[in-house]
Image (cartoon, grey):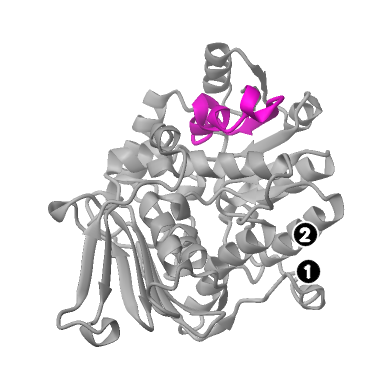
Amino acid sequence: MSEHGAPIRAGVVGVGRGQSFARGAGRHAGMQLVALCDTWEERLHALGRELEVATFTDYDRFLEHDLDAVILANYFHQHSPFAVKALRAGKHVMSETSACFTLAEGVELVETVERTGKVYVFAENYPYARHNQEMRRLYQAGEIGEFKYGEGEYVHPFSALGRNRIAPGVDHWRNWLPATYYNTHALAPIMFITDTWPVKVNGFVVAHDFDDPQIRRTAKRNDLASMIAVRMSNGAVAKLLQGQLRGEGSWVRIHGSRGLMENLRSGLFGERGMVRLRKEAYDVGQEKPEERVYLPAFPEYGAAAVRAGHGGGDFFTSYHFARAIRGEEPPYWDVYRGVAASIAGILAYRSALNDSNSVEVPDLRQKAVRDRYRDDHWSPDPTRRREGDPWPSVLGDVKPSAEGLAYAREVWANLGYQEKDGE
């Protein structure tokens, strides 16, 4: 680590998803893991012994440890409160998606980063896939002209066994998260490639499928998938598709005023990381269109990236976090972009519940705008439900079947997961 100077002492919250950071993505970027925090004691202590680092079940005590930075890989709907507490404790923060779970949390998070002056990085890894980094390079070089229309897809179905393994507990967030909320894997690459922001959304939800034989054997009570139409800050339109439809894949397509680029949708014709660039003959002054399909290299640190998770994305989020802490570059995925991407999914659900009417995505960089959302605590979390809050499904309060609960609890027991009272 001599090339980086003294390592950045980091602690990871969440020993499930957080293992990617704990096992090496951070180390390659000049960070040293010194502590882990989780409430699942058996898994926490086992990983702590393996990696020879301190372990904590109490977050406040974890923050008292000798840390420079905190990496949040805890539950999806809990990132913002943990980030705010860490920032106030003088720690730099890298937070997994989502940045915030309500508009009020978004305002608080933005203002806490501004007030503390600490580094905040939104750990959205999909923009750093090799094809998305290449499409950013092409777009910034003017290869396809001005962004006009885009598509981002993140489709990730699960078997009943796979779903139950990653969602232990009736109230685990994966069992109830509304279909529009997990939108940043689809939206963030478009934002990154084109340097645009979401300004308006229309949300459409594919409702819970009671007849799906895999879903029937889970504790799932949210919807199947969602499509979000997004107006971007330059006037372009984007379509996002996310959810658990059959046909797994991640795909980005960008139409510009002078061309098209996309990654390959199917592995049947090559690697999905391959880029297709298309320009029409009349734009390039040739008899035939210009069309190239190729596998791009990572722009830098390719060897380290391929050893990390999520197609190299886990390396680059850690790498840019470390560079920001060392003052070498401001983070691209700062608190403003992270919150903007996250609240687009929240507001798309609001749209879906209102006949898919348009909803403005506020620009929380503007201090004058924030007061309208400072007390906006609208949330679909069924464990903290208040009057006026939405249910996780557009169909209302969907209940898992007796068959689903029985099989889910069998899987959870085999994982060593102990249900809390009332689950």
Of 262 and 92, nearer the camera is 262
The image quadrant that residue 87 belongs to is top right
* Residue in the picture at 35% in, 81% down: 258
- Point out residue 350 in the picture as x, y percentages from the top left corner: 55, 75
Q: Mark 1 points at which residue?
A: 374
SS for dot 2: helix
Answer left or right for 323 relative to 65: left
- Disc 2 designates what residue? 108
Q: Position of residue 385 (x, y in %)?
A: 63, 59
Badge 1 or badge 2: first in the primary sequence: 2
**Which stretch is magenta?**
2-30
Q: In this view, does 334 lie above or below 201?
A: above
Three-letter amino acid code of the residue under disc 2 = Glu
Q: Nearer the viewer, residue 159 or 210?
A: 159
Instruction: Tell whether label 2 touches label 1 (CB within 8 Å).
Output: yes
Q: Give me the residue at 41% from left, 39% from top.
A: 302
- Residue kind at label 1, given as amino acid type: Arg
